[in-house]
C-alpha cells in the first residue's frame, strides 16, 4: 500500500454458501456459515472471479473462473457481501493480476490437496493451484492489504468477515442482491438523464433570452 494515497476505489468480497457436495463437506469441517469466496470489481458482480468448478456438472474439474452470479450454482446461494476501499494503485494491481490469470487460466488448477492442509494446519504448497480463499488472500497480500498474520494457505472464506477494514453491506441471496443493485443503477441513470435534460433546457432558455 502507498501511504497517503486516497482510497478512491472499491472492490467487493462475496462470501457464498453453495449447496454442492464438496462445499457441504468443507462446511462440515469448518462449521462456518460460508464455504466459498470471490472478488468482484463491480457492484453488479459482472466482474467476479475466484477458483472453483469450471463446469457446474463436474465438481472435480476446477481452476480459475470468471463467475456468473446468475448461474444455477450461485443465484440462489445465501451470501454476505463486503466492500473494501483501495487506492488507485492497489485497484490497478489487482486488475492486472486478474488479467494475468485470465490469460493463463489453462495452466492453473484447483488446489484440492490444499484443503486438507487447512484441516491439518499444514502448509501444502502446489505450483499454479489455489482454492478460493487462498486465491483471494494471495491477491490481498500482493496488493498490500493486511491478513493479520493469517497465511493465505490457511485462510478460510469466513476469515474475511473478521478483517477490520472490510465493510458489511448485504446479507441474503445473490439473486436478490443483483436485483437491488440493478434497480439502484436504473435510478441513477434516470436521475442523470433528468439532470442532463434540465441543464439542456436551462441552457436553451438562456440562449433564447439573449
Image (cartoon, rainbow, N blue to C red):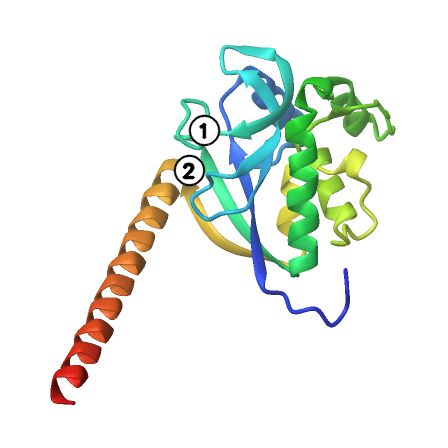
Separation (CA) of disc 1 from disc 2: 7 Å
Determine contact: label 1, label 2, CB under 8 Å.
yes
Out of 51 and 66, give the one closest to the viewer.
66
**Label 1 packing within 10 angstroms: few (<14), some (14-19), many (20+):** some
Q: Position of residue 170 (x, y in %)?
A: 45, 50
Q: Is residue 195 left or right of residue 14?
A: left
Residue 8 badge: none
User: Furthest-front residue in view?
Assistant: 210
Q: Quadrant of residue 117?
A: top right
Q: Position of residue 9 (x, y in %)?
A: 58, 59
**Label 2 packing within 10 angstroms: few (<14), some (14-19), many (20+):** many
Q: Which residue is mark 1?
A: 74
Residue at image location 77% in from the left, 18% down from the top = 113
- In the rendered view of the protein, which quadrant contains the N terminus? bottom right
Measured along the vertical axis of the image, is residue 10 above or below residue 52? Answer: below
Q: Is residue 186 left or right of residue 23?
A: left
Q: Earlier in the sequence, mark 1 or mark 2?
A: 1
Measured along the vertical axis of the image, is residue 151 above or below residue 59? Answer: below
Residue at image location 74% in from the left, 38% down from the top = 155
Tell me if I can see residue 34 in this picture: no
Element marked by disc 1 = loop
Residue 174 badge: 2
Measured along the vertical axis of the image, is residue 200 above or below residue 135? Answer: below
**Number of disc labels:** 2
Residue at image location 74% in from the left, 24% down from the top = 115
Out of 114 and 201, give the one closest to the viewer.
201
Amino acid at each position: 500500500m502507498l501511504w497517503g494515497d486516497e482510497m478512491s476505489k472499491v472492490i467487493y468480497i462475496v462470501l457464498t454458501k453453495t449447496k454442492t457436495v464438496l462445499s457441504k463437506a468443507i462446511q462440515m469441517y469448518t462449521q462456518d456459515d460460508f464455504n466459498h469466496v470471490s472478488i468482484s470489481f463491480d457492484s453488479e458482480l459482472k466482474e467476479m472471479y475466484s477458483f472453483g468448478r469450471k463446469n457446474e456438472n463436474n465438481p472435480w474439474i476446477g481452476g480459475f473462473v470468471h463467475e456468473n452470479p446468475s448461474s444455477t450454482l450461485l443465484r440462489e446461494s445465501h451470501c454476505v457481501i463486503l466492500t473494501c476501499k483501495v487506492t488507485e494503485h492497489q485497484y490497478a494491481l489487482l486488475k492486472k493480476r486478474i488479467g494475468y490469470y485470465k490469460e493463463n487460466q489453462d495452466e492453473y488448477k484447483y488446489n484440492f490437496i490444499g484443503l486438507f492442509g487447512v484441516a491439518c494446519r499444514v502448509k501444502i504448497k502446489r505450483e499454479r493451484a489455489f482454492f478460493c480463499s487462498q486465491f483471494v488472500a494471495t491477491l490481498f497480500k500482493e496488493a498490500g492489504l493486511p491478513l493479520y498474520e493469517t497465511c493465505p494457505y490457511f485462510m478460510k472464506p469466513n476469515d474475511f468477515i473478521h478483517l477490520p477494514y472490510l465493510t458489511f453491506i448485504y446479507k441474503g441471496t445473490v439473486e436478490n442482491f443483483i436485483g437491488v443493485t440493478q434497480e439502484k443503477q436504473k435510478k441513477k441513470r434516470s436521475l442523470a438523464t433528468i439532470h442532463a435534460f434540465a441543464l439542456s433546457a436551462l441552457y436553451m432558455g438562456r440562449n433564447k433570452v439573449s
